[in-house]
Amino acid sequence: MFLLNLMDPDSTDDIPTEPWEATPGVEGFLLGFFFIGIAVAFLMWAMNRSLRKINHNARVEAAKKAEARAAEKEASEKAKAETGKPAEETGTEETLPAASSQSPK
């Protein structure tokens, strides 16, 4: 019978005629809602994981910068204590020759 229906394109025996036969109904809605909920839960989990990684990396980088600043400040204070001058005046940085105040004639 099934093969005969396939052979005859005008046969309407297995075409649903009632609206409830052609729609997914409540079961389809609930099943779709369930799968969408599972997808959203997975996406929230993945985003939370990524944000935790970003936050951790930012904290590590901030700690490294704070440590570098503290080491720089300590070196500056040490140089100041040894020479009695601030680190900028101890010759650790290159200085440009002073421009003469006389104008060319």
Image (spheres, rainbow, N blue to C red):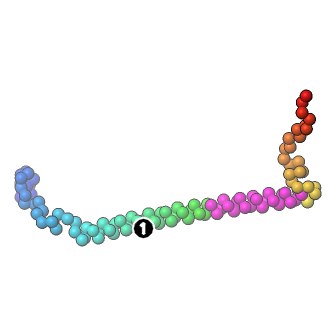
1 lies above or below 98: below
Q: Secondary structure at mark 1?
A: helix
69 lies above or below 98: below
Q: Residue 46, how many percent across, how many down? A: 47, 63
Residue drawn 33% across and 69% down?
Answer: 34
Indicate the quadrant containing the N terminus: top left, top right, bottom left or bottom right: bottom left
16 displayed left or right of 74: left
Q: Residue 73, how many percent across, how many down? A: 81, 59
Image quadrant assignment for residue 22: bottom left
Q: Amino acid at mark 1?
A: Ala
The answer to if 36 sits in the magenta stretch is no
Characterize the magenta stretch by its predominant secondary structure: helix
Q: Residue 53, how many percent across, how many down? A: 57, 62
49 displayed left or right of 10: right
Q: Which residues are magenta?
A: 58-80
| Location of mark 1 (residue) | 41
Front residue (pair 3, 58): 58
Front residue (pair 90, 68): 90
20 displayed left or right of 37: left
Residue drawn 91% across and 28% down?
Answer: 105
